[in-house]
Image: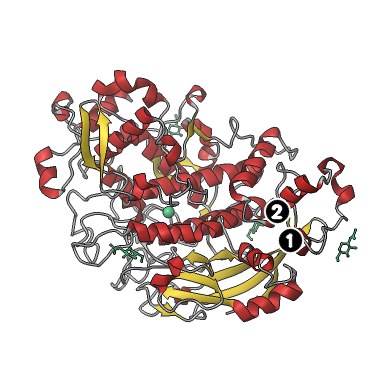
Amino acid sequence: MMRFRLSLLIFLTSLANVFAISQYAPYDYGFDISRRVKREVARRSELVLQPKTSSDLVVRQEIRQLEQDKDVWTLYILGLSMLQFTDQASPASYYGLAGIHGMPHVVWGGVQPVQGNENTGYCTHSSILFPTWHRAYMALYEMIASFWPESERPRYEAAARRFRIPYWDWAAPPPPGESVLPLSIGGSPFVDVNGPNGVQRIANPLFSYNFRPLDTKAFSFGPWNTWTRTLRGPSSTGPDAQSNNSLVAMNLDQNRGSLAQRLYTLFSGYDNYTTFSSNAFGPQADSVESIHDTIHGLVGGFGPGQASSQAGHMGYLQWSAFDPIFFLHHTMVDRILAIWQTLHPTAWITPSRSLTNSYTIRKGQVLSSNTALAPFFSHDNGSFWDSDGVRDHTKFGYTYAELLGPPTFSHNMAVTAQVRTVRQAVNRMYGSFSPASLFLKELRASGFKTSSGKATTGHNFSRSTMAGKIFVGDRYHEWTANVGVGKQALDGDGVVASSVNFFLGDAPRDPREWTATTNHVGTMGVFASVGGYGISGNQGGAHDVAVSGTVPLTAALMKKVAAGELASLRPRDVEPYLKGNLKGIVLGRKGEVLTECVDGIMVGIVSSEVTAPWSEEELPRWEEGKISFEMC
Ligand SMILES: *[C@@H]1O[C@H](CO)[C@@H](O)[C@H](O)[C@H]1NC(C)=O
Ligand SMILES: *[C@@H]1O[C@H](CO)[C@@H](O)[C@H](O)[C@H]1NC(C)=O
Ligand SMILES: *[C@@H]1O[C@H](CO)[C@@H](O)[C@H](O)[C@H]1NC(C)=O
Ligand SMILES: *[C@@H]1O[C@H](CO)[C@@H](O)[C@H](O)[C@H]1NC(C)=O
Ligand SMILES: [Cu+2]
């Protein structure tokens, strides 16, 4: 490992070259670090994703928390900066790592494509391997981001031991006055870092990745062949395009409630791994992947407020991994997986056929928990990690604060203390938009005795109160817009959907005004598609599979109940109300406003009966949803 730390340093490009390309430099350590190490190219053995010993278990922090730990934060910024200034030809450079996912569709670590799939990346989407492939990906990134110059080891030794990559929780309430998008990510293209050689102003490695250089052979068509750095909500498709992080921030803030509700439902109402894992159209509409898709779209600049006819890198599967926010987002996705696994210890991958092509997987091939997660090496003989191998994330030396100790994968269904603790955390973190949180609050206030449990479920709240309008006993209705996106809306030269947006009442004509409207209910991002690139053909057009997701309506309806515009959450009140007031608008890839019922888009309004939790250590129990009516 030490040997690799040294060899990595030599990949730094010369500073002169860097100055010519970019306004901001990397950190100047005061000596030429490249002269201290032998020049060599990373060997496969150095790309092996190594497990750690259990004594190395450290919590991955939320990015705002990590920022409070000054030495670790400094290491993080310096390490990421160094990675980004590493020669793009190295597989252990930022470019090399990001390039595993999609573009530039090249061999990494010698792992060859299957014939015919050369024009895709290694990433698995619309696939039961989506969560585990990206888990290994983040672990590899964490391993390679954790190399620092030898000379800094004494000062930062303790900090280096407790460094793990942070995640970005886009569903958590931001501190007062702040956006869901942290300033450290979107606030400034440069950052003043107090490194070993004093305070220096360097390129902010979380704001953007600057291609050094942009390879216009690999990125051969516009706007990707003109944008020399990654962009969010780009102002134009030209070479001088700027990111609009405030637009992205507003867009995310507008959707935080929707995202929190989706997570809460995913944790409480989704028990089947197949359904949970991927956005492929299935019996339940949502999934960890669909929720993740929405973030990709919003960060890219799709959805409310779309500024130009073109979204930035995060909005497109094949370019997304170059934006540094990708890794913060996917660490959050890994955390969702880890929390869900703890709540569903026996649920796991059951074999099924791949719906999509990737660099090493053929459409139609049977996928299982033993399928290689290529190109993530487990040994230097060239074998790969598989999903069973990464099922327990703690072997990579990290965990998340909500999870006490290693997960238990027993087949014993008895609820462990760990599960109760995780449920409590889920209630506290993501339950605030759900009727469940109102029920728990009323329980505490009214002195219902939770210990007497079901004996009191017949009790009704007074009809004159909010709780009385929402609950019958301990039961209530959840309302969801289930969105299916078929092939016709994903690909080809015609209409290509990028987001489906819901409003109660009319929406402003101009989507740029949507970020400020109070009647916006939520946005579902469509990310699975890789069509609509403006070139015919084969840029990974393998992802032509029908996908689905949801936009929860319950929190918006509860506001209407509180305002006296709706009598209750029961179908006899809600169904006519939604038929009269719910508006769905599809935005296309170029930001164009389409009607709700574009070819290929299906919207079903679903109500589900739910039993509220009687303590924070329980989660709501969902019954199968019923289609109330079809909007499209
Ligand atoms: C960023 O987007 C917001 C919201 O659409 C807009 O008001 C603002 O003018 C944009 N800023 C720039 C610099 O384009
Ligand atoms: C999970 O859902 C899939 C897809 O609908 C189904 O084939 C499978 O039988 C389900 N698994 C369990 C354990 O119910
Ligand atoms: C690689 O080494 C591991 C550990 O020794 C072994 O389990 C595996 O079978 C080997 N794989 C190949 C392809 O040789
Ligand atoms: C609670 O309300 C429901 C629906 O109005 C009713 O059927 C039930 O009898 C009520 N329970 C009690 C204990 O009053
Ligand atoms: Cu992603």
Q: Type of residue at label 1?
A: Met
Q: Quadrant of the C terminus?
A: bottom right
Cβ–Cβ under 8 Å for marks 1 and 2: yes
Q: CA distance from mark 1 to mark 2?
A: 9 Å
Residue at point 32%, 32% (across, down): 74
Residue 545 in percent (x, y) is at: 48, 67
Q: Residue furthest top?
A: 154
Residue at point 27%, 65% (across, down): 235
Q: Is residue 445 above or below residue 383?
A: below
Which is nearer the eye, 130 or 60?
60
Residue 349 in percent (x, y) is at: 59, 49
Q: Quadrant of the N terminus?
A: top left
Q: Is residue 149 visible?
A: yes
Q: Secondary structure at mark 1?
A: helix
Q: Is residue 314 visible?
A: no
Residue underneath mark 1: 466
Q: Nearer the viewer, mark 1 or mark 2?
A: 1
Residue 62 in percent (x, y) is at: 46, 40
Q: Quadrant of ligand 4?
A: bottom right
Q: Earlier in the sequence, mark 1 or mark 2?
A: 2
Tag count: 2
Decide if residue 594 is on the left or right side of residue 438. left
Q: Quadrant of residue 33?
A: top left
Residue underneath mark 2: 438
Q: Quadrant of residue 184?
A: top left
Residue at point 52%, 67% (across, down): 518
Decide if residue 47 is on the left or right side of residue 405. left
